[in-house]
Image (cartoon, rainbow, N blue to C red):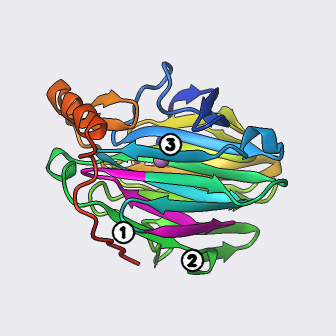
Amino acid sequence: MTTRNIEQIVRASTVSEGAGVTVHRTIGTPALRRLDPFLMLDQFRSDNPDEYIAGFPDHPHRGFVTLTYMLDGHMLHQDSMGNRGDLRAGGIQWMKAASGVIHSEMPQQTNGLMRGFQLWINLPAAEKMSRPEYQEFSVTRIPEVVSGGTHVRIICGEYAGQHGPVDDRHTHVTYLDVELGPGAEFSHDLGSTMHGFLCPFEGEILVDRKRVSTHDLAVLGPGDRVTLTSGNTGARLILVAGRPLNEPAVQYGPFVMNTDEEIRQAIDDYRNGRLVRGTQPHRAT
Ligand code: CO
């Protein structure tokens, strides 16, 4: 078994999204355009309502999956599939936009901390125009493995014989929230075929003798096992990995397809009210 080193450390760029929400982006910036199958990672983290209150009014997606992990705060999701999702602290939402979804994500709080991650996961070509799907799980559905001072919450994939509730069958994503006490070591075998990254959101970690701080994203190099140590105030991070698609990707904002022609089609469909196909609600929870 080989230990994965750090291939690149990406410092987050601050971006204004939606109607004016401040997010900290790592994947999806000039420093790291993509990390196949991952297209974008945004962290939102603010206790200033001016930075989140405007929310994300109705907007489209086509060609990929959005996975939102809410750490603190309360958001209401509504979409063209007919879903109404109540995202609260510790909850997860997996939305396969596929052929097209229009949705809104609006804060249900006027003060206090809003904190979480949104990850965009690409879909294989054969799935890009398939039927949209939706999965949502509250904090009580997330398994937590506690060992000593280490807490691992399993959102997707497997850890210590337990499985996360999200079924991500296209890219076999592993998504763990790892909380460590001061100077603790953590190790996990991701297998050799996955692309992966670490993103601390509290404290800092040491990997491959490199220091990775809050907001930074560390891209894992080839190998199997990831091994890291928390700093002297402890740390909390997400560890995410997925199977690369190795297919061409063309992105225009919220549309990610394989060719320019498919992007032109997506823009045309959206302008002409054809992005959403059918209106049958489909909920897979
Ligand atoms: Co969206």
With 283 as the anchor, is 181 left or right in this view? right
Q: Is residue 210 left or right of residue 272?
A: right
Q: Quadrant of residue 150?
A: bottom right
Rendered location of residue 114, percent (x, y) = 74, 52
Q: CA distance from mark 2 to mark 3?
A: 21 Å
Name the N-terminal-most of marks 2 and 1: 2
Give the residue at mark 1: 167
- For the point 68% across and 43% down, which residue is it? 54
Residue type at mark 3: give it. Phe
Q: Assess mark 1: CB under 8 A from ligand 1?
A: no
Q: Nearer the viewer, mark 1 or mark 3?
A: 1
Q: Look at 49% across and 51% down and name the residue there.
A: 240
State whether residue 3 appears in this view.
no
Mark 2 or mark 1, whichever is nearer to me = 1
Q: Is residue 46 above or below residue 280?
A: above
Q: Is residue 87 magenta?
A: yes
Q: Which residue is mark 2?
A: 143
Evaluate if marks 2 and 1 touch, with contact meaning CB atoms under 8 Å apart: no
Q: Position of residue 245 (x, y in %)?
A: 24, 43
Q: Which residue is mark 3?
A: 197
Magenta region: which residues?
Answer: 83-102
